[in-house]
Image: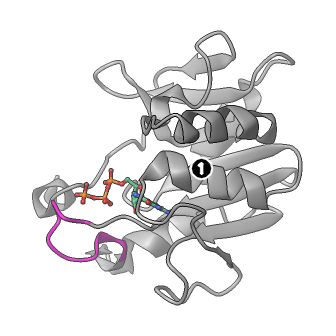
Amino acid sequence: MNDLTAAVLAGGRSSRFGADKALALLDGQTLLNRVCASLQACSKRLLVAPPGRYDAPGWHPVPDTRPGEGPLAGLEAALGAAPPGWVALAGVDLPDLTPAYWQALLEARTPETLSVQALDASGRPQPLAALYHTALLPRVTGLLDSGERRLRLAASRESTVLVSGLPGLRNVNTPADLQQ
Ligand SMILES: Nc1nc2c(ncn2[C@@H]2O[C@H](COP(=O)(O)OP(=O)(O)OP(=O)(O)O)[C@@H](O)[C@H]2O)c(=O)[nH]1
């Protein structure tokens, strides 16, 4: 994962969880540390979150360009801070991601690809554990400027490769999600 920039998004409100879910524990580790561990092999590692909120050694803090405006805005900050090339974007609330998951996405790229996303158990792409090319930055900025906030529109269908059958897509939104 040498040519990959990691970007973990941790600027959310955790309103459904009721406390900061980045700091919730699963098997003795915070969700933030678990997600970061899956991307530790990346050459550059960015943590997109409010300044000073988390202590993550080895992770470069990146402030949101549009604080509180959601994951698409977090992606804009990540693509703007990354060197040209591929970015692995991860929500802090996907604690079962592994290096093997990211490796599978990397291997699915083709020359025309600008995003690689995995299909979850219900067959929907998971845009919060996905690869994005920095060439998408103008599109993402245009979407945000026009009032769009849906992360799934960050890349066109034609430029997105979908991968099925990958484990690791548990998404923690509520305390009950942690028990499953
Ligand atoms: N940097 C950044 N990350 C965000 C922002 N909004 C959400 N995230 C992150 O994106 C991921 C998915 O967030 P959600 O679960 O949809 O939103 P949330 O605000 O964390 O939680 P809820 O308040 O329960 O909706 C999490 O890792 C959040 O920390 C934002 O504005 N900036």
SS for tag 1? helix
- The residue under the point 39% across, 78% down is 29
Callout 1, which amino acid? Leu
Magenta region's main secondary structure?
loop
Q: Position of residue 148 (x, y in %)?
A: 45, 34
Q: Is residue 99 left or right of residue 58?
A: left
Say left or right for 152 vs 44.
left
Q: Which residues are magenta?
A: 14-22
Q: Residue furthest front?
A: 146
Q: Is residue 94 above or below residue 30?
A: above
Going by the image, does 122 lie left or right of 37?
A: left
The front one of 175 and 156 is 156
Q: Compare residues 78 and 93 and report the one nearer the observer.
A: 78
Which residue is located at x 18 percent, y 54 percent?
177
Quarter of the displayed picture in which ligand 1 can be seen: bottom left
Residue 166 in view of the camera: no
Residue 158 image-quadrant placement: top right
Q: Residue at x 49, y 74 (%)?
A: 33
Is 173 included in the stretch rendered in magenta?
Answer: no
**Image height check: is 146 above or below 91?**
above
Question: Residue 39 at what x, y percent from top left?
Answer: 64, 60
Residue 105 can be seen, yes or no = yes
Q: Which residue is mark 1?
A: 75
Residue 30 lies, with reference to residue 115, above or below; the image says below
Q: Is residue 25 left or right of residue 66?
A: left
Report the residue at 72% width, 50% height from top. 79
